[in-house]
Image (cartoon, rainbow, N blue to C red):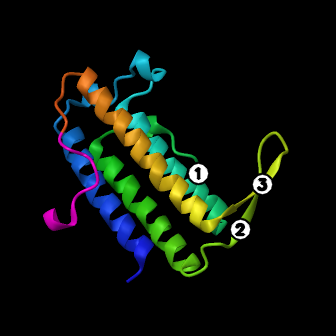
Amino acid sequence: MDLLASQYDWIKRTREILFCYCEDMSHTDYVKGLANFSGDSIRDMHAHIAGCYQFWLGSHGLGKSIVKIDPETVNSVQEMRELFKSTDEIVDEFLSKYKDNWEHTIPFTFKSGETSEFSTLWLFTHTTTHEFHHKGQMVKMGRQLGYTPPDTDLIAPEKV
């Protein structure tokens, strides 16, 4: 069994619950900026999550040239699903490339000129925990907009 691929599969299943939750919202609410979240909308958070995977795993980890996501170009939850399908392809490629080589490090230069090295395991862990952090924020945003969220914690294997 490929442990990290299985883990990412659970993440995708949990993400599906959030997509269904967002589909029950009006489009106006999905794209509405909220002051408590620096003016970001649920759509903006969704795009930010996909962008994080694309940047760290696609651009940095795989050396792909990837255009930064503009949330305003994503007009519906269905379009966001499509964005995540291409993101999932990047994650799958990353997991395949670095399978059994999780201590491999990749140098990175920050805008400040400072450099660091990140292991491939760190890159994968960072992007997945980042998604769950923002998923929690999205659920809270939905609550502020008057929607009752489903349980979006990691799905128990027996429910799959």
Q: Quadrant of residue 34?
A: top left
Q: Which residue lies at the image location 46% right of the left edge and 55% below the top edge?
A: 128
Residue 151 among magenta residues? yes
**Disc 3 residue type (three-letter):** Ser
Q: Is residue 135 left or right of residue 28?
A: right
Q: Which residues are magenta?
A: 150-160
Distance between the alpha carbons at the discs numbered 3 and 1: 23 Å
Q: Nearer the viewer, residue 18 or 33?
A: 18
Label 1: state its secondary structure: loop
Image quadrant of residue 60?
bottom right
Q: Earlier in the sequence, mark 2 or mark 3?
A: 2
Taking 111 as reference, is 16 above or below it?
Answer: below
- Camera-nearest residue between 136 and 89: 136
Rendered location of residue 31, percent (x, y): 34, 29
Tell me the crowding category of disc 3: few under 14, some 14 to 19, or many 20 or more residues within 10 angstroms, Cα based: few
148 vs 12: above or below: above
Q: Residue visible at 19% across and 36% down?
A: 149
Residue contact at pointers 3 and 1, CB within 8 angstroms? no
Q: Is residue 70 magenta?
A: no
Q: Position of residue 53 (x, y in %)?
A: 51, 55
Q: Residues within 10 Å of mark 1 (few under 14, many from 20)?
A: few
- Which residue position is annotated with label 3? 116
Instruction: Compare marks 3 and 1 and give the one earlier in the sequence.
Output: 1
Would you name the residue on which mark 1 appears? Answer: 67
Query: Where's residue 78, x and y in %?
Result: 27, 48
| x 42%, y 16%: residue | 35
List the residue tagged with mark 2. Answer: 105
Under circle 3, the secondary element is strand
Which image quarter: residue 64? bottom right
